[in-house]
Image (tube, rainbow, N blue to C red):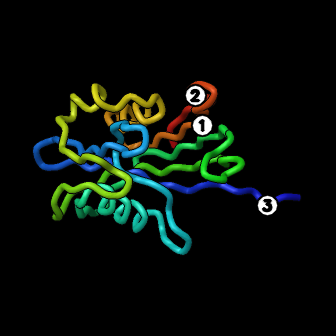
């Protein structure tokens, strides 16, 4: 039996005291997203999101609370020698900025604070739009969702936990 393989990632929904959300623009693809990425070997989820936000945007954060857990159960052919991209499990955390300065990175070409109500005008990826809406709708219960992104975005299961 083959051992299961998952990519584990953490996303940071960073809101400042003005009600603005931190967004970064991906170098590859040019899409606006909230910062986040894969958790490294030996790294816990919260340290991973803190590191990813800092690396991608220059902003230092503390983690407030978990708002969503998501499974992207689509598997598809990768790039750069990756044969198959496995199932991804993502944890979205609300974070508060505590320092740093906006910057870019090897992965991002821009970073900025965006009015909370304008975020959906900039974020175009259906999965990220859905996850951001779960943040806006947060009522104390964590959102769980199973979706696929390819060949097209489709929610397979949704509930609060």
Between 7 and 55, the one lying in front of the other is 55
- Circle 3: is it few (<14), some (14-19), or many (20+) Cα within 10 Å? few
Tell which residue pokes out farthest to the bottom in this image.
Answer: 42
Q: Earlier in the sequence, mark 1 or mark 3?
A: 3
Task: Classify the position of the N terminus by image quarter.
Answer: bottom right
Alpha carbons under labels 2 and 1: distance apart: 6 Å
User: 42 or 92: nearer the eye?
Assistant: 42
The residue sitting at 56% across, 56% down in the picture is 8
Residue shown at 16% from the left, 41% from the top: 19
Residue 40 relative to residue 156: left or right: left
For residue 108, side relative to residue 17 (left or right) = right
- Please state if 20 lies on the left or on the right of 37 as rendered: left
Residue under circle 3? 3
User: Pointer 2: what residue?
Assistant: 155
Q: Is residue 124 visible?
A: yes
Identify the residue position indicated by label 1 in the image: 146
Taking depth in this image into account, of 117 and 76 the one nearest to the observer is: 76
Which of the two discs, 3 and 2, sits closer to the camera? Answer: 3
- Regarding mark 1 in the picture, which secondary structure is present there? strand
């Amino acid at each position: 039996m083959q051992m299961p393989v998952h990519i584990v990632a953490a996303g940071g929904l960073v809101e400042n005291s003005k009600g603005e959300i931190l967004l970064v623009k991906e170098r590859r693809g040019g899409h606006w997203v909230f910062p986040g990425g894969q958790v490294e070997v030996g790294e816990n989820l919260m340290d991973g999101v803190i590191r990813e936000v800092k690396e991608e945007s220059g902003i230092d954060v503390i983690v407030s609370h978990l708002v969503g857990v998501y499974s992207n159960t689509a598997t598809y052919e990768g790039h750069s020698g990756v044969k198959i991209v496995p199932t991804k499990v993502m944890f979205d955390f609300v974070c508060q900025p505590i320092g740093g300065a906006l910057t870019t990175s090897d992965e991002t070409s821009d970073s900025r604070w965006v009015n909370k109500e304008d975020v959906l005008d900039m974020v175009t990826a259906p999965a990220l739009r859905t996850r951001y809406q779960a943040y806006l709708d947060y009522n104390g219960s964590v959102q769980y969702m199973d979706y696929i992104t390819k060949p097209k975005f489709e929610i397979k299961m949704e509930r609060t936990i």
